[in-house]
Amino acid sequence: MSQKFNELKRQVQNVDKDKVGQLVKEIKQAFEDGKINENERNELISTAKQSFSDIDLGGLGGFGKKE
């Protein structure tokens, strides 16, 4: 696991609901920049969905799609 992944995982587990949107953007950017791989991204997505199942994660479901 990459250092960036470990950092993002800690953030996902401890993020306040009002800051989750920014964290989702950071995860997406880290994946696009090649700092985390697809498996790491998927684990972060899963963790975020479990942690915040009661709120909208700003399009997290389609977050692997490049625009």
Image (tube, rainbow, N blue to C red):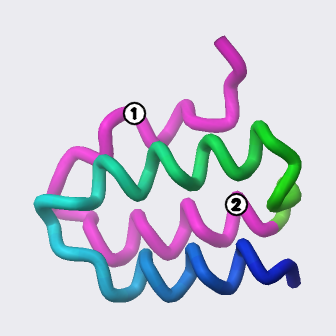
Indicate yes or no whether the magenta region holds residue 56: yes
Instruction: Examine the structure image and report whether residue 16 is included in the region drawn in magenta.
Output: no
Q: Nearer the viewer, residue 31 or 57?
A: 31
Going 59% across and 68% down the picture, which residue do you hit? 44
List x then y, in percent, for residue 16: 18, 74
Pick whichever, 23 or 61, lies toward us: 23
Secondary structure of the residue carrying tag 2 is: helix
Q: Which residue is mark 1?
A: 59
The stretch of residues the image draws in magenta is 40-67
Q: CA distance from mark 1 to mark 2?
A: 14 Å
Q: Is residue 36 above or below residue 34?
A: below
* Residue at (28% x, 77% y) in the render: 15
Closer to us: 32 or 53: 32
- Horizontal side of residue 1 vs 11, given as left or right: right
Residue furthest out toward the top: 67
Q: Residue at x 38, y 74 (%)?
A: 50
Residue 52: % across, % down: 26, 67
| The C terminus, quarter of image | top right
Label 2 belongs to which residue?
42
Q: Is residue 18 above or below residue 31?
A: below
The residue at the point 29 percent across, 48 percent down is: 21
Amino acid type, mark 1: Gly
Taking depth in this image into account, of 14 and 3 the one nearest to the observer is 3
First in residue order: circle 1 vs circle 2: 2
The quarter of the picture where residue 33 lies is top right
Q: Please state if 49 lies on the left or on the right of 44 as rendered.
A: left
